[in-house]
Image: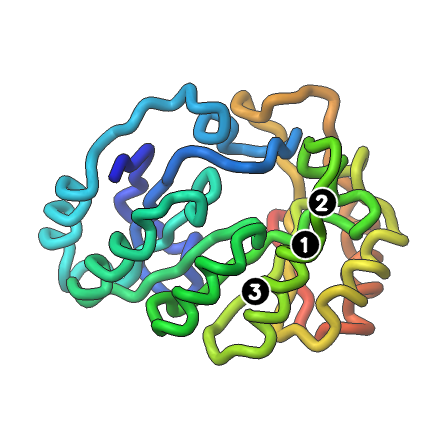
Amino acid sequence: MKIHGLQKMTLLDYPGHVACTVFLGQCDFRCPYCHNYELVDGSAPACMGSDELFAFLKKRQGLLDGVAITGGEPCLHKGLYDLIVEIRKLGFAVKLDTNGNHPALLSKLLDGHLVDYVAMDIKNSPSKYAMTVGLERIDPEPIRHSIDLLMQGTTEYEFRTTVVRELHEAQDFEEIGQMIAGASRYYLQKFTDRDTVPYGNLHAHSKESMQMFAEIVSKYVDYVSLRGVD
């Protein structure tokens, strides 16, 4: 299996763990604000195979306690299940980042108790989902199914939204709150422009707007917090 990036240590990507972050290529969404678009469009070359990753992890046993797997969209890879099995055999906890569009594989991972934490993106309100992920249309049922799997299961999870001024407004967070009502935690992440973001002229909301959006979702979710806001 091809690995497209490796951050050898992070204290941020996996809450409460000293972890490394593994980046996998490919994604079925085309979000215009994506920070990892070189993984989405295939322009980033693979940096190692799974055997090299396992060799690295063996050397980090006792130094790292977790592995965060992100992308791109990891659940596009048929080899993800086996990759996680091997990582867990080495004694590491696993965090998975996903867009929620692949509930069958997510269910298999959850049922097998192979992931310890899942971070699922909630891109926008249902009526604006396709626009926000850069597609002409999208079936919302896989997203709703993944939400239900996480909320009805026992695996730790979070929902999160990267908030972009051109894409998100107050009413969207009312609808997002209704989508995830009763969830354990939800984060609003401030958009930050980078060289790898595929489209220009996108902007962050103000701190005050972010706080207002958080208050809206707080009617539905007990724990709501902001990320990247000074």
Identify the residue under disc 3.
158
Residue 130 lies in quadrant = top right
Query: Viewer-proximal residue, 62 or 176?
Result: 176
Determine whether the residue tagged by mark 1 lies in a helix, strand or loop: strand
Q: Residues within 10 Å of mark 2 (few under 14, many from 20)?
A: many
Q: Residues within 10 Å of mark 3 (few under 14, many from 20)?
A: some
Identify the residue under disc 1.
188
Q: Counting residues from the N terminus, which is met first, the one under dot 1 or under dot 3?
A: 3
Amino acid found under the numbered disc labelled 1:
Leu
Amino acid found under the numbered disc labelled 2:
Val
Query: Viewer-proximal residue, 9 or 117?
Result: 117
Q: Nearer the viewer, mark 1 or mark 3?
A: 3
Q: With respect to residue 128, does 212 lie above or below?
A: below
Q: Counting residues from the N terminus, which is met first, the one under dot 2 or under dot 1?
A: 2
Q: Is residue 9 visible?
A: yes
Residue in view at x 66 percent, y 29 percent? 32
Pointer 2 and pointer 1: residues touching (CB < 8 Å)? yes
Q: Is residue 72 left or right of residue 5?
A: right
